[in-house]
Image (cartoon, grey):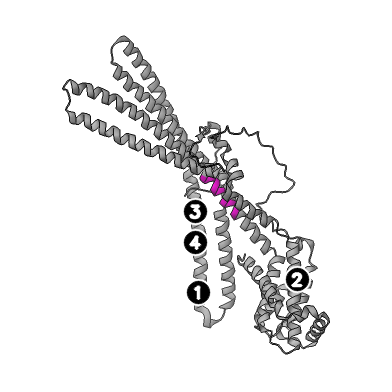
């Protein structure tokens, strides 16, 4: 697949529009233009024209201009060549992109999605985040407009425009030639138009537009994933902030105890001052963390189309169930991920282009005098194959790591739950001891701190599991892996 087709198409149409201005008399005197065209047809055929006349195959016609070099006029076979193409079968001219296996059949029934519960004002949930980003993010809306522009392309109209330009350039060249005017500059424009015509007829233009649309959709997916990553980051920082506040409360209790001990002369003043200094630093760090969270929330608000006030409540992350983990299958999910991956698709296109170049170079360097060029070409082609293989291996490696990370997260989460259950029993026992007077109130509070720390560990483990599972689902469904 040649990825410069759209550029050739645009350049060809623009060149035709510019060159048509060279013959203003053509529009004013159509009869004279027809006479000039008839005179051009009556002239002896150039070598390239004769070569095309001997073969009805489009490939031979396409190769004729390159073989004969640049001539002084547009050969009359160009118009006939395009005329033959317009009589092709409907399957070749329906203006649809070739089926690459990624598009779903129009007859495939659409499953009804479960009803979505909207977020309360001033809140955002992870479940609704994707839809809100896709519907309200201005960057995504701009990309969707570009996609709509691609969907609006009328390939039939494009064919008609190309056909009209090819006829016009050919007629202009013949008309100017009848006055002895050099038209060599128009030959390259005609060649560009013919190449664009071939690309449109063979589906290359349609495929390039389809690839461009798929790439834009990939960028949209990256934006949505970025919003979800930002969401999880904010949730994590809010948990860190809560842990910090709990630690500050513990520090305050310690300072109260140390002040009493300092008054009793049990500790030096420096020890108390060190604790108060630690508290001041902790408060400063917590204030900085609060500012960071507010800034990130403002970014998230912009991504969902709201005013960036920095004040929005994030709902808890969805829990990952054991059933979801049991449904994970490395081989099946990897195959689905590779099919959906834009990275691998683009790498395959690059490999195809390298192969096309390799075949062309083999044709050009087939003589003994250019043998060294052929050797270089073979090495370049081999390097392209290795590069593609490395891309696939990197994708598979990253996917496998994501798979195993989720499984490990589940184990860590279960361990945190087990420790929390133990701390609950331990704290209950401490409460009994305190009621019996066998431990002090401070000792009871220390046990409560241990219980709160265990609870925070459960929340942190659950967050990590949700984050990594979300990353894994993005890999499976959209082919986006974190490498």
Q: Which residues are magenta?
A: 215-226
Magenta highlight: main SS: helix
- Category of crowding for the residue at label 1, using alpha-carbon neighbours closer than 10 angstroms: few (below 14), some (14–19), many (at least 20): few
Residue bearing mark 1:
375
Residue 388 visible from this viewpoint: yes
- Give how far apart the Cα atoms at labels 4 and 3 are: 10 Å
First of labels 2, 4 by sequence position = 2
Does residue 331 appear in this view?
no
Q: Is residue 223 magenta?
A: yes
Is 411 positioned to the left or the right of 443 in the image? right
Q: Work out whether mark 3 precedes mark 1 in sequence or the reverse, and give the earlier one.
A: 1
User: Does 200 appear above or below 479?
Assistant: below
Q: Which residue is drawn at the image coordinates 68% and 80% (left, top)?
A: 186
Residue in the picture at 73% in, 82% down: 173
Q: Residue at x 65, y 57 (%)?
A: 210
Q: Which of marks 2 and 3 precedes in the sequence? A: 2
Which residue in the structure is indicated by mark 2? 163
Question: Residue 461 at what x, y percent from top left?
Answer: 44, 33
User: Can you tell which of label 2 and label 4 is closer to the viewer?
Assistant: 2
């Amino acid at each position: 697949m040649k990825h410069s087709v759209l550029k050739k198409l645009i350049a060809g149409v623009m060149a035709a529009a510019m060159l048509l201005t060279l013959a203003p008399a053509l529009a004013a005197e159509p009869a004279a233009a027809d006479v000039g065209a008839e005179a051009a047809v009556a002239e002896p055929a150039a070598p390239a024209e004769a070569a095309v006349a001997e073969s009805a195959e489009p490939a031979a016609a396409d190769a004729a201009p390159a073989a004969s070099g640049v001539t002084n006029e547009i050969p009359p076979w160009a118009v006939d060549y395009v005329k033959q193409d317009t009589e092709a079968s409907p399957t070749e001219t329906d203006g649809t992109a070739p089926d690459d296996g990624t598009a779903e059949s129009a007859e495939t029934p659409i499953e009804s999605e479960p009803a979505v519960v909207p977020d309360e004002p001033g809140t955002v949930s992870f479940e609704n985040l994707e839809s809100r980003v896709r519907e309200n993010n201005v960057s995504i809306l701009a990309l969707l407009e570009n996609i709509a522009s691609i969907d609006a392309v009328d390939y039939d109209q494009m064919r008609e425009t190309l056909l009209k330009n090819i006829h016009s350039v050919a007629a202009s060249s013949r008309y100017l030639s009848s006055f002895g005017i050099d038209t060599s500059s128009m030959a390259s424009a005609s060649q560009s138009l013919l190449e664009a015509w071939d690309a449109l007829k063979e589906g290359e233009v349609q495929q390039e537009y389809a690839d461009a649309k798929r790439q834009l959709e990939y960028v949209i997916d990256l934006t949505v994933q970025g919003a979800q990553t930002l969401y999880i980051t904010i949730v994590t920082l809010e948990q860190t902030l809560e842990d910090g506040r709990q630690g500050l409360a513990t520090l305050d209790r310690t300072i109260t105890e140390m002040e009493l001990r300092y008054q009793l002369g049990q500790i030096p003043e420096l020890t108390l001052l060190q604790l108060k200094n630690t508290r001041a630093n902790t408060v400063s760090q917590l204030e900085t963390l609060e500012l960071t969270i507010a800034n990130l929330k403002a970014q998230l608000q912009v991504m969902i189309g709201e005013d960036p006030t920095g004040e929005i409540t994030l709902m808890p992350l969805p829990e990952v169930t054991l059933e979801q983990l049991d449904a994970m299958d490395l081989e099946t999910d990897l195959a689905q991920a590779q099919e959906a991956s834009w990275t691998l698709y683009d790498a395959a296109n690059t490999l195809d282009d390298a192969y096309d170049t390799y075949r062309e170079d083999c044709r050009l360097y087939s003589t003994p005098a250019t043998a060294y060029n052929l050797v270089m070409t073979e090495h370049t082609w081999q390097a392209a194959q290795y590069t593609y293989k490395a891309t696939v291996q990197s994708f598979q490696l990253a996917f496998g790591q994501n798979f195993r990370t989720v499984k490990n997260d589940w184990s860590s989460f279960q361990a945190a739950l087990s420790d929390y259950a133990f701390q609950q029993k331990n704290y209950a026992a401490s409460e009994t001891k305190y009621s019996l007077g066998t431990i002090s109130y401070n000792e009871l509070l220390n046990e409560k701190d241990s219980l709160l720390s265990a609870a925070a560990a459960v929340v942190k483990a659950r967050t990590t599991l949700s984050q990594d599972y979300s990353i894994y689902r993005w890999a499976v469904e959209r082919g986006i892996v974190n490498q």
